[in-house]
Amino acid sequence: SQKIEQNSEALNIQEGKTATLTCNYTNYSPAYLQWYRQDPGRGPVFLLLIRENEKEKRKERLKVTFDTTLKQSLFHITASQPADSATYLCALDISGHTGFQKLVFGTGTRLLVSP
Amino acid sequence: EADIYQTPRYLVIGTGKKITLECSQTMGHDKMYWYQQDPGMELHLIHYSYGVNSTEKGDLSSESTVSRIRTEHFPLTLESARPSHTSQYLCASSGLAGDTQYFGPGTRLTVL
């Protein structure tokens, strides 16, 4: 069966450390992979997109890697801050270059950054 | 901040009532989506639209219906609400393929 796995347990880290979140998937061949941030009671907010032919993408303190052989993406937040505390969602674009974007979401990993 | 709006933000309603959840975007996006999300669970696509007069059902079966008469407007309707419809409903829109999806703040629906 097709599924996306993210750490279901919350990740607790101290301020200033690097947070690493994992997204594993099976039986998908995504054209793109995206990471979103979701705060309680709010809609997800886009953070980064990485294509199937890209290994790594960076944006400020954020870095995402994409290994299509391992079927895994890692999402890193360096110099983490309490304001980074949220749930981070991995989403696969399985539209297959059809021109219509179809995202499948993981359940998300909750990140808690302590001062 | 995304220019996509949902009303109401919270709705508590009795079984059997007809409800319409509103979603509007001012970005001129052709593609719009409705997702359903239960607490601690993943988002499930229930409806999507390529553009005006185009609507499709998503992966998760839903008793709701949608319409797309105007580009900016994508309302979701439940003809007869039931407690099993209690959930958070998120509307989103996107432009080019591979582009990000912009989400609204969501409507938290509770059916008693």
Image: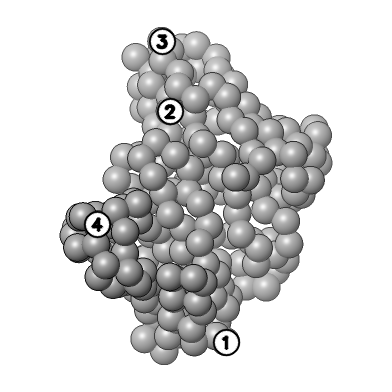
Name the residue tied to disc 2: B108
Residue at image coords 39%, 76%: A73
Residue A44 image offset from top left, x and y in percent: 48, 49
Name the residue tied to disc 4: A113
Q: Are marks 1 and 3 in contact (CB under 8 Å)?
A: no
In the structure shown, which secondary structural element does the residue marked by tag 3 occupy?
loop
State the CA–CA distance, disc 1 to disc 3. Answer: 50 Å
In the structure shown, which secondary structural element does the residue marked by tag 1 occupy?
loop
Closer to the camera in the image, B110 or B94: B94
- Label 3 marks a residue whose chain is B
Are there few (<14), some (14-19), or many (20+) residues within 10 Å of tag 1?
A: few
Residue A111 image offset from top left, x and y in percent: 27, 57
Asked if residue B29 shows in the view, the reply is yes
Q: Which mark is residue A53?
A: 1
Question: Are the residues flagged by discs 4 and 2 from a single subunit?
Answer: no
Q: Are marks 2 and 3 in contact (CB under 8 Å)?
A: no
Judged by depth in the image, the label closer to the viewer, 4 or 2, is 4
